[in-house]
Image (cartoon, rainbow, N blue to C red):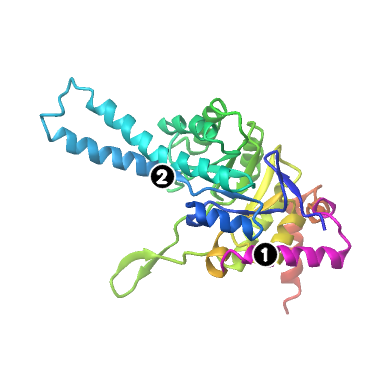
Amino acid sequence: MDLSTTYMGLELANPVIVASSGMTGNLESIIRMEKNGAAAVVLKSIFEEEILLDLNRQLKEAQQNPMIYSGLSETLDYLDLHIREKNLGDYLKLIKQAKKSVSIPVIGSINCVSDEDWTYFTGKIEEAGADGLELNLFLNPADFENKEFEKAYFRIIEKVLAEVSIPVSIKISRYFTRMGLSVKALSETGISGIVMFNRFFTPDIDLDTLSLVSGKLFTTPEDISETLRWIAIMSGRVSCDLAASTGIHTGEGVIKMLLAGASVTQLASTLYMNGPDQITRILKRVQLWMEEKGFDSVQKFRGIVSRQYEGNPAAFERMQFMKHFSEIN
């Protein structure tokens, strides 16, 4: 069975990528993922916030010491450069080590909350040898101050594409005014891929302490529906590759996303819960299904379900909705 596919212009052995997470934040784990069959890894994101918070802390300390800080000194500039270089240096080191140790593509990742200073990092990541770059655009949909929420995505993409020549993908949330039009427009900016979707913090309330606590950390197989719906709707309507993420736990989940039109899938929760060898089990299930159905390559069946409704994908949802409720007595 030929499981090979392409994503962001990268040739991959199969459609399973390890998503940006703690599992891709160290060299040992990355090597283990490759041994279990991962076709690529997206490195754990470097966060804009952690750099800025560290910078603000050291600036406050410096400002309290008149021996090293004055309004005319270059302390601020020095601290700014030093902290950025240190945080970025650790990340660049991981990219270089990974490229020497594994043969699969290594994709860098930046989790950003603005379109300002962090674009400084992108060129450095390319120089370190990353095969691609994923922008985890984690803009807050509950931000009542930002009236140009969706425009920020386009500004970020424009700035990054001006800095690098490696393929760039974006990881987006489900929070857009008009998802279909927005995703289509984003795909036409020159990016090479869109990952649908990133996962926000899920809150819960502790009834004993009356305080906010973290909800479920991992996705479940039931979380696959929303991703599956939008991969199917957007397949064939975008100008870049689509990667499916969230709720994909088994070989069946991977198969469904490919049938819907995804080029690849990104896994995280299932690997935390079942270990890296879950990748091997998933790929075996995909191969077995392909043999049963008579497909000798992924390309033979990718997108065939979504193409059945390419004339009017929204009608598919409506048809199923009416069919379901019309059968209730």
Where are the magenta residues, as a range?
275-301
Say what amino acid the circle numbered 2 marks.
Answer: Asp
Residue 83 position, x and y percent, is 32, 36
Q: Residue at x 61, y 68 (%)?
A: 222
Q: Nearer the viewer, residue 130 or 309?
A: 130
The residue indicated by pointer 2 is 143
Q: Nearer the viewer, residue 146 or 276?
A: 276
Q: Residue at x 65, y 41 (%)?
A: 193
Q: Please, which residue is most extreme toward the bottom here?
A: 329
Question: Residue 144, labelled with which disc?
Answer: none
Q: Residue at x 18, y 34 (%)?
A: 62
Q: Quadrant of the C terminus?
A: bottom right
Please identify the quarter of the rendering in which residue 49 is found: top left
The residue indicated by pointer 1 is 280
Q: Gap in Å between the C-alphas at discs 2 and 1? A: 41 Å
Query: Considering only order in the chain, which callout, 1 or 2, is on the residue closer to the N terminus?
Result: 2
- SS assignment at label 2: loop
Residue 320 position, x and y percent, is 75, 64
